[in-house]
Amino acid sequence: MPAGLTPPASGIPVSDAVGSFKRRKRKSIIVTAMLFVVSILILVFGLAATTRTQNITVGGYYPGVILGFGSILGIIGAHLIENKRQMLVASIVFISFGVVAAFCCAIVDGVFAARHIDLRPLYAGRCEYFSSATSSDQDVQCQTPRVSCKLRVKSNTCYCCDLYNCGNRVELRGGYHEYTDVQSCQDVVHLYHLLWSATILNIIALFLGIITAAVLGGFKDMVPAVAPDTCEPDPLAIPGPPETLAPSTSNSFYNTAPCLPPYTAYDLQGSLFPDSSVLSDDSQSGASHMWPSMIPPRYSPPYYPPDDKPPPYSP
């Protein structure tokens, strides 16, 4: 039996053990592949949110890297036999760290998108976009219902005067009043949606990572069951009783009573040439009457069963 393979426990059919192993393996691969897809989406959305603007870099793409690496280890380990347990343990460790990172990033991205990005002035059309090819910084006039002031902005910046408190640059409503290095103010809307998408994906990865770690933990100690060797020789059939051959007249070896003359040549010679001087008529008649009793017994050779060989002939 190959190394690493153990027969199924007693009382469990081999087909059921093999089927259970295949089902657990398929389930492990499916959940790990799902986690890998979610981690790729987290990585894509997180990097897009991080690189959308220059002054906001809170996209949670770190869980995507950790969970993606752990998922790859899990998929590889599910197909191994020898080092399956070690690979799956490493996968569970990375997935566990990824779950913790996903929890933290979901909180950070969700809180930031909810409290620090206010799209109401943008939807109301009170935000402006400044872009200049000659100068990088410029003072713009911000007119609010209460006060009017100047705001220094950089090139390729979307700013909202309603969110700017003139004089101390403190946000009135807790939101960012400018977003630098953007193509238009529409990029702020995209940033908002990307942050919420990354938050939702991190929450999904949080629960899916827990499920994946549990499934891989139950599968890492399972070994494939193999059917018993079928190359063993078949048991020999017990031979039945030998058939008794009927006696045949053509073969005298198997006859229990061979056909031999009732007397020998010596007896025949004595009976054909009697001594006339000794024997009389009465004696001859008596001899004739006594002849049957004087016949020697028939010669019967020893009987040997069909399976035994007779002893060698010795003259």
Image (spheres, rainbow, N blue to C red):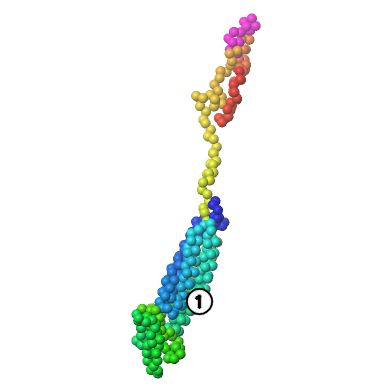
- Is residue 111 within the magenta segment? no
Quarter of the image with the C terminus is top right
Q: Nearer the viewer, residue 51 or 279?
A: 51
Q: Which residue is mark 1?
A: 104
Query: Three-letter amino acid code at disc 1?
Result: Cys
Q: Is residue 58 above or below residue 162?
A: above
- Report crowding for label 1: few under 14, some 14 to 19, many 20 or more residues within 10 A (C-alpha): some
- Is residue 275 within the magenta segment? yes
Percent x, y of residue 187: 37, 79
Q: Report the residue at 37% width, 88% height from top.
A: 140
Residue 195 falls in which quadrant of the image?
A: bottom left
Q: Nearer the viewer, residue 207 or 269?
A: 207
Element class at badge 1: helix
Q: Residue furthest right?
A: 278
Residue 186 in view of the camera: no
Percent x, y of residue 212: 50, 68
Q: Report the residue at 39% width, 79% height from top.
A: 181
Residue 179 falls in which quadrant of the image?
A: bottom left
Residue 51 in view of the camera: yes
Residue 57 as seen in the image, left or right of residue 303: left
Percent x, y of residue 168: 46, 90
Q: Report the residue at 50% width, 61% height from top.
A: 77
Looking at the rendering, the stretch of residues picked out in magenta corresponds to 267-279
Percent x, y of residue 68: 47, 67
